[in-house]
Amino acid sequence: MSSQPTASSPSSTTDPRGAKSLLVVASLAMVLVFFAAAVPAPIRAAWDEFALRIQLQSEPQSASPAKLSDHEIEEIANLPAQQQAERLLERAVNHYDGALELIGKSVDNWFGQLELQGQLSSLLTTALNSNDLRVRAAALEIELAEKLVDLEDAFRQWRFRHATTVERVIGMKRGTGGTSGVGYLRRVVEVELFPELWRARTAL
C-alpha cells in the first residue's frame, strides 16, 4: 500500500505574516487611542478642520429674514384699511421685517374701519397664538382699534336711551343726582370717550 501525502487543512496552519500584520494594526490602534485620550482638544480641532474641508459639515448660515420692500409698502398704503390690516398682519405672522413697525404707525388710522371677520379674524386668531410676543401685541392693537369704537358707540346709545327714559319718567324736573336732569343728560350724550378715534376719521 502506497502512502499518499495528506493535505493539511487551511485552519490547521497559521500564516505568520498575517498574524504579525494584525498585531501591528492592533498596536497602532492602541497607541492612537491612548494619544487621543491624552490630548483630546488638538485632535478634535484637527478633526473639525478636516471635516469642514471635506464638506462633512459647514458653518451655519443664518437665514436672511423676509423684508417688506419699498414697493409693497407703497402698495399697502394705497389699500383700504381692512386690506392694509390683513396684509400687514399676515406679514407680521410670517416675520417680515418692518411689518410690526408699520402696524404700529397705521393702527390709529384703522379705528372704526375694520370688520373682525373673514380673513382678518383668522389672522388675528393665528397672531394671538403666536410664539412671538410682538406679533401677539400687534394683533391686540388691531383688535383694540375696533373694539374701542364699538364700546364708544354702545355707550353713546345707552346715554341717549337713558336721557329719553328720564324725560318720559320725570319730564324736565331736576335730576336725582342734583343735576339739571334731562338737559344735563342730553349734553352728556355728546361727550366722547375716545375723541382721538373720531378725530382720526377727519384726517383720513
Image (cartoon, grey):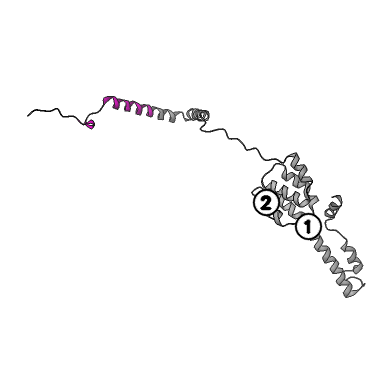
Answer whether residue 57 is magenta in the image. Answer: no
In the displayed structure, 101 sits above or below 121; it is above
Amino acid type, callout 1: Leu
* Occupied quadrant, residue 164: bottom right
**Which residue matches tag 2?**
127
Task: State the residue at coordinates (30%, 25%).
Answer: 20
Task: State the residue at coordinates (76%, 58%).
Answer: 147
Rounded to the nearest whole Å, what is the CA distance between mark 2 and mark 1? 20 Å
Side (left or right) of 25 relative to 167:
left
Side (left or right) of 29 relative to 121:
left
Q: Position of residue 3 (x, y in %)?
A: 10, 28
**Which residue matches tag 1?**
148
Task: State the residue at coordinates (47%, 28%).
Answer: 43
Q: Position of residue 13 (x, y in %)?
A: 22, 29
Q: Nearer the viewer, residue 26 or 95?
A: 95
Side (left or right) of 34 relative to 102:
left
Boundaries of the magenta span: 8-30
